[in-house]
Image (tube, coloured by chain):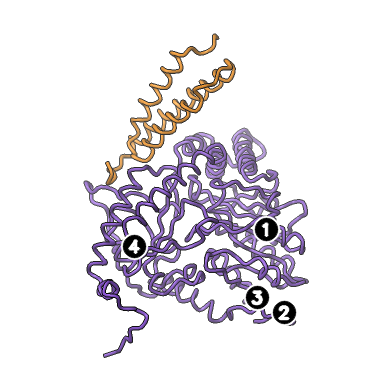
Amino acid sequence: MAASTRSQVLSLYRMMLKESGRFPSYNYRSYALRRVRDAFRANRKVEDPKSVERLMEEGRQALALIQRQVSIGKMYGVQKTVVE
Amino acid sequence: MMSPGRTASCRLLRPASWLSLLQGSQRSAGGAPRRELIKKHDLGKNELRPLYMDFQATTPMDPRVLDAMLPYQVNYYGNPHSRTHAYGWESETAMENARQQVADLIGADPREIVFTSGATESNNMAIKGVARFYQAKKRHVITTQTEHKCVLDSCRVLEAEGFNITYLPVQKNGLLDLEMLEACIRPDTCLVSVMTVNNEIGVKQPIKDIGQICRSKGVFFHTDAAQAVGKIPVDVNDWKVDLMSISAHKIYGPKGVGALYVRRRPRVRLEPLQNGGGQERGLRSGTVPTPLAVGLGAACSIARTEMEYDHYRVSMLADRFIQKILSEIPDVVMNGDLEQRYPGCINLSFAYVEGESLLMALKDVALSSGSACTSASLEPSYVLRAIGTDEDLAHSSIRFGIGRFTTEEEVDYTAEKCIQQVRRLREMSPLWEMVQEGVDLKSIKWTQH
């Protein structure tokens, strides 16, 4: 498979942010959004295609994890916190 | 309780008076009726939840940890000690994997990790186990006055069995005096126990130096690293630590599991606390809870990769919080050394304000004054007493905890509310009025009617 293009990376980034925003818990939601953003930002300069592919795979697994945990969070609802 | 032939540098608090402080707070936690100013009440359906700023008491589970645990709660439910079928094998693989993850975090070999039910059990195992194993020749144990209750209580039990325990005092900044420690080590000392990061004031002890001293004198060194593991870099070989207690629920893992690191070279022998089928090298019999162990392993592995990121964030948020508070209200004391600390544990004393009333006023934020284990009684925390805090300041201390999931908004909100409420409570305080007028409170003669 060809190395991930810039648009694929951006698409993964957008999907991860969108999914992270769906966490019902304030703390998990803010953490996921921040962590995803900071992780992509930190790896912005990576050039080597193998590393890029490895990071993309990690990202896809993380996306699946976020999706699962968002569902679990929605199953067991919780009220909003004071800062929301 | 002076050891014969020792110099005055080892003159310490008599155990009787010191332990009676501990007993006092324990009695009220036990069964006697106690006054509770903050009444327990369930949150109404539409009531907003308070912010969580009590990360030293426990931490929320990281979603990645839960994700790792669930398969073992749902489908892969085998007993890891079952040797005859796939359920057992896959469970064992998961457990050993988790063991490797814990070992990697602290720089140990996986064979040196024993899964327990938490840091309390690990502390009990380490202290009682080592002391009892070597009791023929060695009858002395050294610990500090700021240790966790489980360590102090284990030492009390050992005293009843005939051991001599030295409870070393700490300096005003919460740090141990290394010369005092060295002077106290006797030929019949078997164990020194000092916690790495204190759960109440966040002070970080000079573990590397203590390890050096203990190794040079041939004494085993145990450290309760529950608050330190996964937050600051820990290396048992660099620090020359022989036993280390780890707690999962302090590092975003599940509650009910922990680990004890027991060094193999040079070998540390323990008398097991829990006997049975010989699991965990015979040191802790009983089925290892695979999902919990997997959770602990996942928490350790995540902590390893996230340590730098988290530490940077927690330091930044802590500075932000402290700057805000100190710039807006006077007469605030931070308990514990300012440099040698873990930034995420901030213990502040607000003069002329009562701690419980401030906690009640800050009902939108989950905080504690004193550790979760001692906050039941109205006695000020023994840790604050050990660092020489004045009685009145000890009563007005609050512990703020910052962790991986804390946001800037939460920190700002807490600081704002805190400033607001402290000002309001001080307005109502007659002591504050007197101070404003320039009266020296210590010169007041309080009379009885």
How far is mark 4 from mark 2, CA to CA? 45 Å
How far is mark 1 from mark 4, CA to CA? 36 Å
Q: Earlier in the sequence, mark 2 or mark 3?
A: 2
Give the numbered dot on residue B282: none
Q: From the image, state the color of chain A.
A: orange
Q: Which residue is mark 4?
A: B330
Tags 2 and 3 on a common chain: yes
Residue B153 seen from this side: no
Where is residue B67? Give x, y as percent.
47, 35
Q: Which residue is mark 1?
A: B209
Mark 2 lies on a secondary structure that is loop
Q: From the image, state the color of chain B.
A: purple
Tags 1 and 2 on a common chain: yes
The residue type indicated by label 4 comes to Pro
Q: Nearer the viewer, mark 4 or mark 2?
A: 4
Q: Which residue is mark 3?
A: B161
